[in-house]
Image (spheres, rainbow, N blue to C red):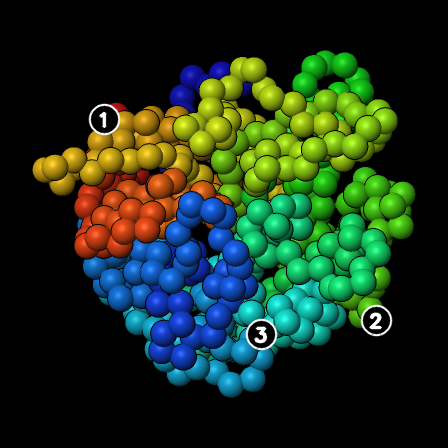
Amino acid sequence: MLHKKLKAFPQDFLWGASTSAYQVEGANLEDGKGPSCQDVKEVPEGTSDLTVCADQYHRYKEDIALMAEMGFKTYRFSISWSRIIPEGTGAVNPKGIEYYNNVINECLKYGIEPLVTMFHFDMPAALDKRGSWSNRESVDWFLNFAKVMYENFGDRVKYWLTINEQNMLTLVGPVIGTLTIPEGCTNELKEIYQQNHHMLVAQAKAMALCHEMLPGAKIGPAPNISLVYPASCKPEDNLAAQNYNAIRNWLYLDMAVYGVYNNLVWAWLEEHNATPEFAEGDEEALKSGHPDFIGFNYYNTATCEWDDGSEELSQAVDQQTARGEAGMFKGFKNPNLPTTEFGWEIDPMGFRATIREMYSRYRLPMIVTENGLGAYDKLTEDGKVHDPYRIEYLRKHIEQVQLAITDGCEMMGYCPWSAVDLISTHEGMVKRYGFIYVDREEFDLKTLDRYRKDSFYWYKKVIATNGEDLSD
Ligand code: BG6
């Protein structure tokens, strides 16, 4: 649709950026924090471990002051479960509560709305030992953690996100370092979708509890949504795209919003004897969630073609790689899209298409909780970081958000990844996303000082003009 006049971003649009606890905080075993699965995993060769990260635990004041300087309206960060409850269940760590109180208060001091992710890839290691999400009790563990957060922070936190990228935990858990399969398991697909089911129930219950305990607060899911294109206009490629859209995207949002399983995914799981078991009350619990908005991460679209099921397909490399499922779809490299230095396709127009599709399916306001470009940034001798490629990427994506708003989609905010440089899920420190440069290398911690990148100044102007001025 060509628009003659663009609608402005809403006056209360939440401009900000995101991070996650295990990737940015460091201090991973300090002040009573228990280890999470991220602290005990084997990190990919050549990449840093997660002990220091960007050291935000000790530098949150400086980081939040820089965010305030950029004019942030919101800061999306996550709360580390094992910093709050070191063993995952049981005793609460007062130092953990104190730390997040400090972060929240520091944000509020500058008028920055905290947007809190309750769970971002960091299951307490103690709960991993008890079977992680495979254990039915995980629903109660999570609900208890949610309750502790609502009790301690609910007087000040108005926006909550449940589980970051539950779809990626399910589809590419090993890449992120989160998949635990119990010994003796004979049907891995069933096990993974049982874990997924527990997360879905936990999420729905946490949303219902939020509404009960914090009537003024808003809560939503935060999956990674990438619209899937068919590789061609062949009818079978279109079916393949529908299949992958269902497996990758709609399963999670159909559940969060309507509390029902996507029928295509259910049929596929039936084929593999992999449908999850429902415990008593799950059906009602799933329908009781009712998110107030949808948070979603967008990096690029996916493309796929028909698969006749005759051969074994390669598995996904990471979050943004369309994998294959025999007889369902096969990943296809889209020849129309450029890629980042790390091989992720770049598709700003697909961002608009993704937003339009989500809005027509769910009719809820949306906030972008991640979007961004990972690159090898370089600090110059005079303390500058010239990152025109990041400005270009973000500009093109923000333009598409405005077009989607003009299309009639309700958008609440935009939080790119990431506020500060941090450790990537599997590609280390060298894959930088931040507006704020952190002076460290993969293994050499250097000064950990902060520097404003060129994109810092650019984003400051974008926010100051409420998205009207996107020029350099
Ligand atoms: C998302 C995650 O998948 O993408 C983040 O929510 C992650 O945790 C981000 O860091 C970028 O991915 P990567 O693999 O480049 O770190």
Could you tell me which residue is drawn at 73 percent across and 54 percent down? 192
State the residue lying farthest toward the front: 45
Q: Nearer the viewer, residue 349 or 198?
A: 198
Q: Amino acid at mark 3?
A: Ala
Q: Position of residue 408 (x, y in %)?
A: 52, 33
Answer with left or right where residue 227 lies relative to residue 7.
right
Residue receiving disc 3 = 126
Residue receiving disc 1 = 472
Could you tell me which residue is drawn at 40 percent across and 76 percent down? 96
Q: Residues within 10 Å of mark 2 (few under 14, many from 20)?
A: few
- Measure how far apart labels 1 and 2 are at the Cα level: 57 Å
- Measure how far apart labels 3 and 1 are at the Cα level: 48 Å
| Of labels 3 and 1, the one closer to you | 3
Up the image or down, 35 lies above or below 41; here it is below
Could you tell me which residue is drawn at 40 percent across and 79 percent down? 32
Q: Amino acid at mark 2?
A: Glu
Is there CB contact under 8 Å for labels 3 and 1?
no
Q: Position of residue 372 (x, y in %)?
A: 41, 37
Could you tell me which residue is drawn at 26 percent across and 54 percent down? 445
Q: Disc 3 or 2, which lies upstream in sequence? A: 3
Answer with left or right where residue 139 lies relative to residue 394.
right
Q: Nearer the viewer, residue 404 or 51?
A: 51
Up the image or down, 58 lies above or below 379; here it is below
Answer with left or right where residue 250 lies relative to residue 23.
right
State the residue lying farthest toward the left: 382
Residue receiving disc 2 = 280
Q: Nearer the viewer, residue 244 or 263?
A: 244
Q: Secondary structure at mark 2?
A: loop
Q: Disc 1 or 2, which lies upstream in sequence? A: 2
Q: Quadrant of residue 467?
A: top left
Task: Indicate yes or no: mark 1 CB to ligand 1 under 8 Å.
Answer: no
